[in-house]
Image (cartoon, rainbow, N blue to C red):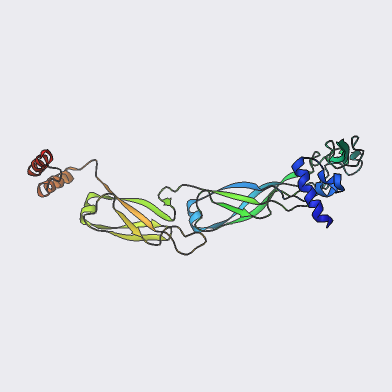
Amino acid sequence: NPDIFADFTDILGDFFGFGFGDAFGGSSTRRRSRAQQGEDLRFDLEIGFEDAIKGMTADIQAPRLETCKSCSGSGAEAHDGFTTCSRCRGRGEVIFQQGFLSVRQTCSQCGGRGQIIRRPCKECGGEGRIRVERKLKVTIPAGVDNGKRLRLPHEGQPGANGGPNGDLYVFLRVKEHPIFSRRENDLHCTVPINVAQAALGTEIHVLTFDGLESIKVPEGTQGGTEIKLRNKGVPYLNGHGRGDLYVRIDVKVPKKLTREQRKLFEDLVETLPAENEPDEKGLFDKVRDYFA
């Protein structure tokens, strides 16, 4: 099968760096014209915190290089834009002797085309491709996180010699939220209450991405206590269910008091035990046990 042999000699040619298959009758034109996939592209997209949780559709302007329509990718003017290569005389390859073998190698001056651009295309400047921006729609699923990348197949650079386009990868950067922070699929926030609310208990309203939620704060709640709201977090990406929302209670102590407020606190101090007074007997027992 000559096709199998051609593939074999192409591999050897790539390994040794010259037209190895040509020495055995293979075709260098087949190897030079092999289709190659285009390069992948990257596009960075910033989205809001809520958009990452709920999902969205975004319009982006993605740049890439496309074949110049004026010269059909040749890089030369349509009329009299090429001249015959002086080194290979239009064959696209040169022959040289290597030991007892006559080896054919792709012409380095014309790159195997057999022709050299005499008059570059005015549209692309001889490059054969021009930079264009395309408007694309990107569907962002609910639950994506910062750094997540989305793949858009065949939206990258065009391939060489008729090869397929590369892919476009959209990298997401999620903005920070002034209230919520995210840890995997759980959300966290802090709600302040005053000392009286913490001591007596209260009911507070918390803004979630599903609307307002009422939370009962039991009496005697200490600062730093967390209350969990189930299924109020971030949806699992490409799955079912959601994370939880953790509400951290921050007990605020007033920095300034009115005269009436100070009197109330002074009366309260007389009725409450002093939590920070040391237990003299307990301290003596601990010292004795240590030295014993």
Question: Can you see residue 34?
Answer: no
Q: Quadrant of the N terminus?
A: bottom right
Q: Seen in the image, is 158 located left or right of residue 229? A: right
> Which residue lies most toward the bottom here?
240
Question: Can you see residue 204?
Answer: yes
Q: Seen in the image, is 109 located left or right of residue 53? A: right
Q: Seen in the image, is 262 located left or right of residue 17? A: left
Q: Position of residue 108 (x, y in %)?
A: 83, 36
Q: Residue at x 14, y 47 (%)?
A: 264
> Exactly how many numbered labels are in the figure?
0
Q: Position of residue 97 (x, y in %)?
A: 88, 36
Q: Residue at x 13, y 40 (%)?
A: 290
Q: Residue at x 7, y 43 (%)?
A: 281
Q: Position of residue 111 (x, y in %)?
A: 82, 40
Q: Seen in the image, is 78 located left or right of residue 223? A: right
Q: Which quarter of the figure has residue 88?
A: top right
